[in-house]
Amino acid sequence: MNDIIIKLLWTLLGLFIVLNWGMLMGASMRKIVARVAHRRGIPIYQPWLDLIKLYAKRTSISHGVMFYLGPVFRLGGGVGIFLFLPLIYGSEYWSNFSWAGDLVLILYFQFFGMLGMALGAGEGGHPNSVIGITRGLSQFTTVEIPLTLAVISLALQYNTLSITEIVAAQQGGVQNWTLFTNPVATVAGMLSLLGALRHAPFNLVKAPNEVPIGPPTEYHSAFLGVLRTNGAVLHVVEAALFMNLFFGGATNWAEFIIKTFLIYFWSVFVGVVHPRFRIEQSVVWFLKIPLAIGVLAVILYI
Amino acid sequence: MDKIIKDLTSRFKVTDYIQQRPNMAYVTVQKELAISLITHMRDIEGFTHFVLLTAVDWIEDNLFQLTYILNSPDKKVDLGIRVMIDRENPTMDSAHHLWQQVATYQRELKEMFGIDFPGSPRVDESFILEGWDDIPPYRRDFDTLKYAEETYFPRDGRGSNDPAEYMKKKLYPDEEK
Amino acid sequence: MSEEQNINQNNEPKEDKFLAEENKIRLVTGPDGKQFQVNPLDDYFCDKRPQVVAPKNKIIEKFLNWARAESLWVLGFGTGCGSIEIPPLLSPRFDAFRYGVQMRPTPRQSSVLIISGYLAVKTLKRAIRTYEQMQSPKYVMALGSCTINGGMYYDSYNTINRVDQYLPVDVYVAGCMPRPEALLAGFVKLKERIKAGNAEGANEYAEKFDWYKANQKKIIKNWNMPDYNW
């Protein structure tokens, strides 16, 4: 009993670190985009201020129960991934609650938030949010396919569905990383990461200047604050998942921060130099090259 | 251009005619003939582009002047057709069957001048002024300044200067005259 | 047909000559086949008046006001000619992001409404709806001389002279039109006001609600929406 409480506290501390690291990454992403456009960009502490402001709004209105639950589901999706993801390999406390089948669970949680959001946005009743959620779901479905194929390939390669064991198999030097032992699956995974993190070319769903802002059109005040919190957590957690799957995991926090930063910025740098895809273009794009590579990765290990 | 006008005068009863530019002319016709003249110009003379429809309030003569401007893309000429209608009972035949966009102009004229175009689609709906209950604002007997002062809480202390005079006074205060 | 007449008789005579078609009382057939009467103004809209929300503890409020001031989310709603000065704000030359100014496309999320230039009566109606959909605390910035005293449209039949009669304005930016630099200066002024705790426009609107509504209804003659629509 005592053990689980101590572990819970460590997990909460981890969540706090991950949240702040995610906001810092988000801020530096916007800073980089600004520098590329020859601007000074936001102050580095802007995301925290936005969050405080959103939670400190004096009024908020609701459209019903699902409207409340939408952001909660979304946050549940993000925190759910976090809970079952080992952050630091070899550390008992920072492994959170990872167990034998956590890889499947995480793939499920990735979709869970999106579905909750769809229900909430639907209850909001704004036509733009319905359009946004339709786009979001159709893009995310196609993003998931190459990722799932890459994960299947890894499961076949390492003969396990536990992330901890996958990380363990990659220890002992760079040459043991999945990046080198299974490059085809890595390519498929990294291409689908571009869509999962939703930066440009694939940021049409939430881009503020497309059909007004997509799913969260009707969300405001603390609701939006919850969504933003989740966004920050989700960014780190997605990057950490890919770090664990393809880049040998991390054995300490410094390694964790460097690796997640680089993985995250892979998508930022791609986004900075590419214009935005329309939704049918991105769907078709994911169903062509990444899908083919994913299928190839599975075939190689059957 | 001359040829067109000559042809027009032979066919229709053109009461007045002004050659504004080499490629622009205004003809004035009777109210009853206007729509058939426009149809003739569009279908036979090739004036297929409808430029605008506007109105002028001749309050002294108790008349409204409607101006239809047509353009011929092939001949590169413009033709304005002026129609004088009675100010007391301003109605005009609708031309929305020739060009769809005429209906919008007619809707605007109905709202701003009170000129009625029976049969034009949505002509009775409000166009810009939602729920206007005064006399139509573009008529010259409508006093906009008085209306604005009564309606819109003007701010005290508002003044205006002639810019040239004001700058002269400010930059060269010593200079007389 | 007879049913419709019945409905009309049951209701008190209203001046709803201008009521939009979708806001009229009507009969709706539910999915179970039963017919029931819907009055959209009562059923679909919230008719609660805005409430005054008193500021919290002084020290906490000071901190929150600082956060609010440094994170101004502007609604991209151009009412007049001045809206052309807003996009350059985000360009490399002016870069309003430095000041914590960001554009939001939806009124629900934004905290600053910019009345950019002359406001026709038709636009005023939309601006009021937009303002009421924003969440408190919210601020209004008015650009150009047209919003201050009518500007060059002071004698127009369709352009209002003073915005502060209809919405609580926090900051005026003078000019015709003000340059983007002036807009940035306006943002800085607005920040000072918020940090000093003076920008309580939403509360003022709630307190003097009847006065504002009377002014608005005086010129918006086809009031075909609920009194307070959020």
Image (cartoon, coloured by chain):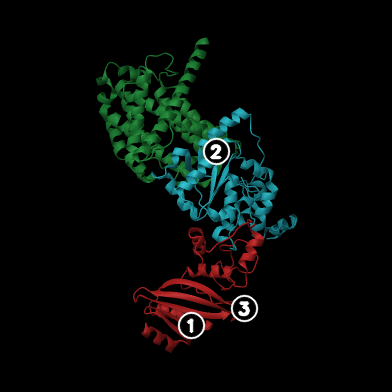
Q: According to the image, label 2 marks what residue? A: C192
The hue used for chain B is: red
Look at 67% across and 53% down and name the residue there. Answer: C215
Look at 45% across and 32% down and name the residue there. Answer: A231
Label 2 to label 3: alpha-carbon separation:
59 Å
Q: According to the image, label 3 marks what residue? A: B89
Does residue A71 appear anywhere in the picture? no
User: Quarter of the image holding residue A292?
Assistant: top left
Quick one: label 1, few (<14), some, or many (20+) residues within 10 Å? Answer: many
| SS under mark 2 | helix
Q: Which chain's residue wears label 3?
A: B
Label 3 to label 1: alpha-carbon separation:
20 Å
On screen, residue C83 above or below A144: below
Mark 2 residue type: Glu
Mark 1 residue type: Thr
User: Residue reaching furthest bottom?
Assistant: B10
On the image, the x and y values in percent for residue B112 come to 57, 68
In contact (CB < 8 Å): disc 3 and disc 1: no
Q: According to the image, label 1 marks what residue? A: B28
In contact (CB < 8 Å): disc 2 and disc 3: no
Viewed as shown, does residue A120 lie left or right of C98?
right
